[in-house]
Amino acid sequence: MKKLLIIAGILIVAFFVLMYFTQDMGYGTYSEGYRMGKLNKFSSTGLIFKSCEGDLLLGKESSYYFDMKDSVLINPWQFSLSTKSALVSNISQYANKYVVIKYRQYRIGPLNWENEYEPLEISPLDTSIAILPYQEQGIDGLKSEGFRIGRVVKLSKRGTITKSYEVMFQLSNIGNDFMSMSVTDENIYRSLMTSLLSGKQIMIHYKKQFMHNPFGQDTDYVVWKVEKIV
């Protein structure tokens, strides 16, 4: 029994030493991107090794949304911050306001954080930004095509070996109608960025492929044209 207590004590001490030296430290970058929405929550949590946790309700006038099919929490988007981050001191000024958050996703998040997403910059929407239309050429293997009206609430470049551009739209003007698509052209990515930074709706034209390379993109849907709404 005494040996077991000694071993347990060593393991507990080792755990706290590990937490102390690795707190707020993530491993590797899996993705980088931007999210747009209303800053709904921000708090400091933890008994010994503290972190800051926040919620961003994606898009405009949306609410809590859980995708039962894929068992994924879509809304709100949750993020973590070190208590030492420069963003902590002024983040309250954005409470209940629509903002754009530039973030990094770690492959392995810090042990004292609740998730692996770390905000790098926070800024208000800039409605003066004009929508930049663009049209891509030549997408093969088409199953269907169409267009949707919506606003961009997420843009990311993700992947461990092969990087892909991914986008999420809020398809209606308000609410939890979201759709994920992929982007294969950097100019389309830049065009979509103008919608995300401004919060403006756009018309996106997409093509659905028969199949896609899972290492090159996440979805069968590819955005090939972006138009501003007149």
Image (cartoon, rainbow, N blue to C red):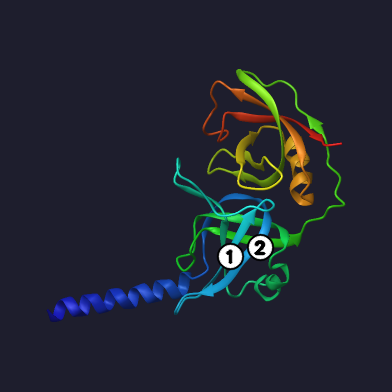
Count up the numbered dots.
2
Amino acid type, callout 1: Gly
Task: Classify residue 184 as left or right of residue 200.
Answer: left
- Quarter of the image where one finds residue 104: bottom right
Question: Which mark, by number, is residue 15?
Answer: none
Circle 1: element type:
strand
Q: Position of residue 181 (x, y in %)?
A: 62, 35
Q: Height in image: 28 above or below 140?
A: below
Q: From mark 1 to mark 2, how far is it between C-alphas?
A: 8 Å
Residue pointed to by mark 1: 54
Numbered disc 2: secondary structure: strand
Q: Is residue 2 left or right of residue 76?
A: left
Instruction: For the N terminus, give its image quadrant.
Output: bottom left
Relative to 51, say whether 138 is above or below: above
Which residue is pictured at 61% across the width and 24% down the height?
A: 208
Q: Amino acid at mark 2?
A: Leu
Q: Quadrant of the C terminus?
A: top right
User: Is 230 or 160 nearer to us in this picture?
Assistant: 230
Determine the residue positioned at 62% across, 56% down: 57
Q: Foreground residue, 14 or 60?
A: 60
Q: Residues at badges 1 and 2 in contact (C-beta under 8 Å)?
A: yes
Please name the residue shown 34% across and 74% down the image: 14
| Structural crowding at the residue carrying mark 2, measured as other residues with C-alpha within 10 Å and reported as few (<14), some (14–19) or many (≥20) | many
Q: Residue tagged by mark 2?
A: 39
Percent of width and height locating residue 128: 87, 52
Where is residue 99? Give x, y as percent: 72, 59
Residue 76 sits above or below residue 174 on the image: below
